[in-house]
Image (spheres, grey):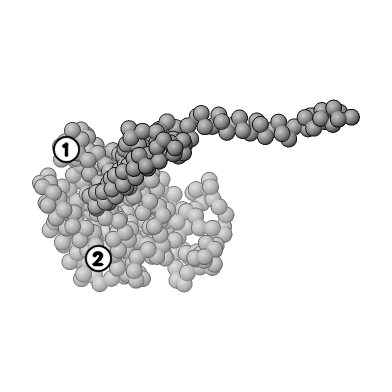
Amino acid sequence: MPHVHFVHPLIFWLGLPCILSFLLLAAYYNTRLIEGLRKFYAPAGMILLDIFSPRSLKQLVSIWAHWILAACFLVTATAMPNGSFAPDLVRKGSVYVEFVVQVNNAMGDESDRKYHPEGDPGAMYQWGTRLDQVKRYIDNDFLPQLKGNKTGITTVEGAGYNMWDLTDDNESPISAFRVMLDSFTKVGSAPGKGANYASGFQSALDEFDLIRDMDKKAGDTVEKEYFIVLFADGNYSGDKEVLNKELAELAKRHVHLLIVGMGEPNIVDVPKYDVTTHQRAGVYEGQTQYNPAVLQEMQKAVPGADFIYAPPGTEHINYNFPAKSGGLYAVPHDANLYPWFVIAALLLISNLALSGGRLPRWRHIVLALQQLRSLRRIFNPGRFSGQKQKRL
């Protein structure tokens, strides 16, 4: 038997009894009223009662049964019922990856633009930024490996910002993770200014703590592997001592660290774009360049950390996450049931209107058509012309 649950259970548990009670009382009152009228006016008033009311008590009960069932189905549909049927057995991923992305002005550097002329909207529009590179690597190189595993996004400037919690909704192009990555992870999508990786690491560790507590409450005891993938140009702007503490915490917790270096080794200007028109409006103050020194120090501070430099023009990043699995687990096969309740209500109402409703019976429609035909004879021009000729 499927387990049915509701998105809005209060509508079902409160709304259904209320509407059912009201309609039952209305049906009882209407039935008593019509039957009383039949007894009072019969047989003189039977013609009017036959035209404007059900012919018998059986038909009256049928009409009210239709209306009551249709109303109950509509209320149930409003409560958004879902049915859990036989569960699907799927392989449970045990790799949790937090993408920490630098999003300060330097990530708007368009040095990668010349390597992707296809689709270039023109010099007045932003194209081929470091951040576009980051999204391409995550979409094309990382996510295909992480199906069934959990991924999250942390953006960082002066402080880290949790852009998206760790979830396994990352497979479809319109999944929540990809929407947040493609549409909301932009230059400036973190508080403050600069590139404080230490704060980004802390935000990522907070996410790991949160998901670990959630797994514990859910009874998930499978051992997980935690990864942080940092996309940065190496121009760290925070406190070095705080950064060292965070790196030591990563090592203590055995968090895997992948550092992806971004940017042009030469000093470059960063184009500035108007936030309203999205057209180029000069360049940002100051210049930027790739600085590997801090990134290499970070790699040495965390045992087993990997470092990859992805200069402009790099199409893919060659990195393999472990294909680790926590075994099979049952995922309820949920199905939205509310369309079926709406269809059932519409079928009842249609049946009511076509065969058992308050529409006039066919014989009365035929009589009405006969009356219209007689009116047509009255106003027939040929009739008047014939009378005129007879008189002459």
Residue 68 lies in quadrant = top left
Instruction: Quadrant for the N terminus, please.
Output: top left
Disc number placed over residue 197 in the picture, else none: none
Q: Residue at x 16, y 58 (%)?
A: 209
Residue 92 lies in quadrant = top left
Q: Residue at x 36, y 49 (%)?
A: 178
Residue position marked by numbered label 2 in the rendering: 198
Q: CA distance from mark 1 to mark 2?
A: 36 Å
| Label total for image | 2
Q: Nearer the viewer, residue 43 or 278?
A: 43
Q: Nearer the viewer, residue 44 or 141?
A: 44
Which callout, 1 or 2, points to the residue nearer the camera?
1
Q: Is residue 335 visible?
A: yes
- Vertical order, 221 against 357 (above or below): below
Q: Amino acid at mark 1?
A: Tyr
Give x and y (percent) for residue 172: 35, 42
Give x and y (percent) for residue 285: 46, 72
Residue position marked by numbered label 1 in the rendering: 329
Q: How many residues crowd mark 1 within 10 Å: few (<14), some (14–19), many (20+)?
A: few
Q: Residue at x 32, y 32 (%)?
A: 58
Q: Secondary structure at mark 2?
A: helix
Q: Nearer the viewer, residue 222 or 122?
A: 222
Q: Secondary structure at mark 1?
A: strand
- Vertical order, 347 against 217 (above or below): above
Give x and y (percent) for residue 232: 33, 59
- Vertical order, 2 against 314 (above or below): above
Q: Is residue 159 left or right of residue 118?
A: left
Between discs 1 and 2, the one toward the N terminus = 2
Q: Is residue 172 visible?
A: no
Give x and y (percent) for residue 221: 10, 46
Instruction: Quadrant for the C terminus, please.
Output: top right
